[in-house]
Image: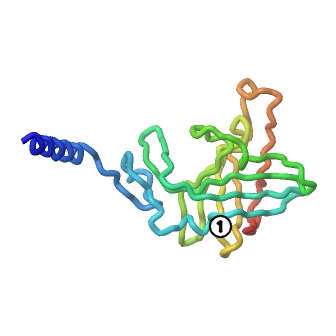
């Protein structure tokens, strides 16, 4: 009798838990922002991001820029109006002079999870144009935040466009000794080659 009672309680708890929990809705990666439901998951159903993953390098203006692109599955996105999860590309980078002197290294720096500065994350794709749209949180004090577009030229090359939105800062919020240089190349159609 005791075993039957225990089984009934377990079954009732399972039924209550199943009806009380909302299933996470899976939506395609490029779902329009207004159509995204809170707590949904924008999944890379067609593996659009996979071909961008890897290590890429380019030379520009006496500097070597190395991009380390990974795919982050189910990254939490918190907006003012809603929160959801999305598969994204994450880019870390190292910029150094051709002499080898490192100017900026986000690959080996520890960045707090909730900090946008120094981070580059994708927020959408345009598969018909072989494009990925990315947001850059900027360098120290958010200087240089803006948009980056990566276009897949072929299986080993990407074209880069970086469009910073703002390079002005409030000097009161950024310490005077802070390096305020944006080392990423602000240029159209810089070609990165897969290493």
How is this picture coloured? rainbow
| Left or right: 106 as drawn, with respect to 39 | right
Q: Nearer the viewer, residue 95 or 80?
A: 95
**Residue 65 lies in quadrant:** bottom right
* In the image, residue 1 above or below residue 64: above
| Left or right: 73 as drawn, with respect to 59 | left
**Residue 179 lies in quadrant:** top right
Residue 169: percent from left, percent from top: 73, 33
Q: Secondary structure at mark 1?
A: strand
Kindly give the residue lying farthest to the top in the view shown.
172
* In the image, residue 123 above or below residue 38: below
Which class describes the residues within 10 Å of circle 1: few (<14), some (14-19), or many (20+)? many
* In the image, residue 139 above or below residue 47: above
Q: Nearer the viewer, residue 43 or 18?
A: 18
Residue for point 65% across, 44% down: 137
| Left or right: 3 as drawn, with respect to 106 | left
Quadrant of the rendering where the C terminus is positioned: bottom right
Kindly give the residue lying farthest to the bottom in the view shown.
154
Residue for point 76% across, 54% down: 186
Q: Nearer the viewer, residue 107 or 157?
A: 107
Residue for point 71% across, 55% down: 162
**Residue highlighted by disc 1:** 151
Residue 138: percent from left, percent from top: 69, 43
Residue 184: percent from left, percent from top: 76, 51
Residue for point 66% across, 75% down: 155
Residue 36: percent from left, percent from top: 39, 52
Kindly give the residue lying farthest to the left in the view shown.
1
Quadrant of the rendering where the N terminus is positioned: top left
């Amino acid at each position: 009798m005791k075993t039957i009672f225990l089984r009934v309680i377990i079954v009732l708890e399972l039924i209550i838990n199943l009806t009380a929990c909302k299933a996470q809705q899976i939506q395609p990666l490029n779902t329009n922002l207004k159509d995204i439901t809170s707590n949904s998951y924008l999944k890379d159903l067609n593996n659009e991001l996979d071909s961008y993953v890897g290590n890429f390098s380019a030379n520009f203006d006496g500097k070597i820029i190395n991009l380390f692109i990974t795919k982050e599955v189910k990254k939490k996105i918190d907006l003012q109006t809603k929160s959801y999860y999305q598969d994204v590309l994450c880019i870390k980078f190292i910029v150094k002079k051709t002499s080898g002197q490192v100017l900026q290294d986000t690959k080996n720096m520890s960045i707090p999870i909730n900090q946008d500065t120094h981070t580059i994350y994708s927020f959408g794709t345009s598969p018909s144009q072989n494009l990925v749209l990315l947001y850059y949180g900027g360098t120290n004090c958010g200087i240089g935040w803006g948009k980056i577009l990566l276009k897949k030229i072929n299986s080993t090359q990407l074209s880069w466009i970086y469009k910073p939105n703002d390079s002005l800062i409030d000097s009161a919020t950024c310490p005077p000794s802070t390096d305020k240089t944006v080392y990423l190349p602000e240029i159209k159609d810089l070609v990165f080659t897969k290493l």
